[in-house]
Amino acid sequence: MQEQGDRPHRKWTLVAAILGLSVTTLDQTVVFIAVPQIERELQIGLAGQQWVVNAYLLVLAAFILLGGSLADIFGRRRVFLLGALAFGAASLASGLAPTSNFLIASRAAQGLGAALLMPTTLALITQRYQGEDRAAAIGTWAAWSGVAAALGPLVGGALIEFVSWRAIFFLNIPVVLFAAAVGFWRVEESRREDASRGDLDFPGAALAALALGAFSYAAIQGNEIGWTAPTVLGAALLFAAALPAFLVWERRTRTPMLPLGLFRNRNFSAANGATLGLYGALSGSFFILMIHLQSVMGYSPWRAGLATLPMTVLFLLLSSPLGRLSERLGPRVPMTSGTALFGAGLLFLAFLKPGQSYWLHVLPGVIVLGLALPLAVPPLTNTAMSSAPEARAGTASGVNNMAARLAGLLAIALLGIVYAGGFRMALEPRQGISDEGRQLIERAREEPSAALQPNAPQRVRQEVGPTVEAASQEAYRYAMLAGVLLALLGALVAWFGVRNPPDRASGRELPQTR
């Protein structure tokens, strides 16, 4: 039992963990709003906008499981401090980035800091709290992460509009410095006694990063330089080699960072498959939506952030009661219906046009999304956790967290392909257009997002404006429909893959198979 005098230190540990998780959550939500402004200043095009987001997600997805192992071996407090300082330094570099390549590199460094920081926050709590106190602490930790997600659109949109997109990165610095200070002076060191350096799966992490990096390069740059370009084909071949090599290594190594044996459990596999569908639809569609709201619909960053705030508020308010409902019914129906409902919300938003009312054409779709997420996410997460042996609960949580980040990485790349392809197909010059206008349209075919802010005389911009706007509208619709498809695939995986435990209301379901 914890001593009474130990409670202040436990509370400070919880404060440090909340700050560490919240700053990484806040960073992810605000960058989606910032990418149109970054594009306007740095002229990075659609591919550049994808890389600003995906450089972070790529490194985070590849190294998050390794980050948890490093904390177990070298000390959770030490790795927490290292992750916080690395994230802060990379945030400073991102805010000062003079070029697009520098910004993308610093975003990758942020991902590395987050890979050390995120898994360590939960490990600190589980080490210092036991029993019911632990459950309450984890609930508080998760709730504050939700608050950070809710504040992201408000704070980020205001900073981007009234200060600069660079300010969203500078905002991270005081938060991580305070978290590091609390960790240094108030958090005790802990590590897993039976852990050793031999448990670190550096080859697995390297192969994962190589596979994800090669896929991202081929998917994103293929839109820019052509699918038959030697570097794109080379990246595709590298991905085709690195992915099987990663799976073979993880199966044969003594201490895999991704234990493939967990996927023998039907519910664990189905829950993570549904995670790929739901979080892929969420991340990919919101990347496209934020570009569309600001670049085509004319929303300011502040207004774009406010536009989706009701979704986050509903998620925070309804997660607990709907989570309890899923406990009574079993996870299958809530997970399936919530993921399908999320697709329905995206379908409603897929037909947004300039000049439409927010209250009639945006808010209803956002509300549907806000009802869908708390219906789907709690049973999805609980199923992934409860399907693994208790001794592997931490690993199961890490795998599910990685699946969510991986979903965003893949979806942003894939929906970018759909967006660029749809834009090119729809971009046809009108009759009577000038030679300068035709040249601008041809340039836009080579670099889709360049047409949104073309570097051309005002007369030519006005001439091609209606054509570009119509093509952008078509491209947006195609990409959002692809997001709908991802959500429906996730719902199908949940319906056909998940089996309710026999003590639930739908007790006719068979027990889980191992």
Image (tube, rainbow, N blue to C red):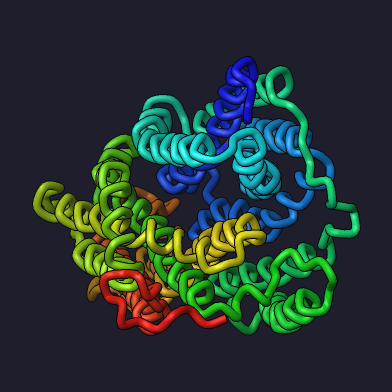
In the visual, does 396 lie left or right of 442?
right
At x 41% / y 77%, what residue is drawn? Answer: 498
Q: Quadrant of residue 317?
A: top left
Residue 455 percent location from the top left of the image:
44, 51
Pick the quarter of the image with the C terminus.
bottom right
Along the viewing direction, whichever of 427 and 223 lies nearer the viewer: 223
Along the viewing direction, whichever of 68 and 428 lies nearer the viewer: 68
Q: As displayed, is residue 107 above or below residue 2? A: below
At x 52% / y 72%, what residue is drawn? Answer: 268
Pick the quarter of the image with the N terminus.
top right
At x 48% / y 48%, what residue is drawn? Answer: 39
Q: As displayed, is residue 38 above or below residue 272? A: above
Q: As displayed, is residue 471 above or below residue 79? A: below
Instruction: Identify the residue at the far front of this view.
Output: 1
At x 82% / y 79%, what residue is drawn? Answer: 252
Residue 336 percent location from the top left of the image:
31, 72
Residue 316 percent location from the top left of the image:
32, 43
In the visual, does 286 lie left or right of 341?
right
Q: Quadrant of residue 231?
A: bottom right
Residue 64 percent location from the top left of the image:
67, 54
Along the viewing direction, whichever of 447 and 395 lies nearer the viewer: 395
Along the viewing direction, whichever of 134 and 367 lies nearer the viewer: 134
Q: Is residue 422 visible?
A: no
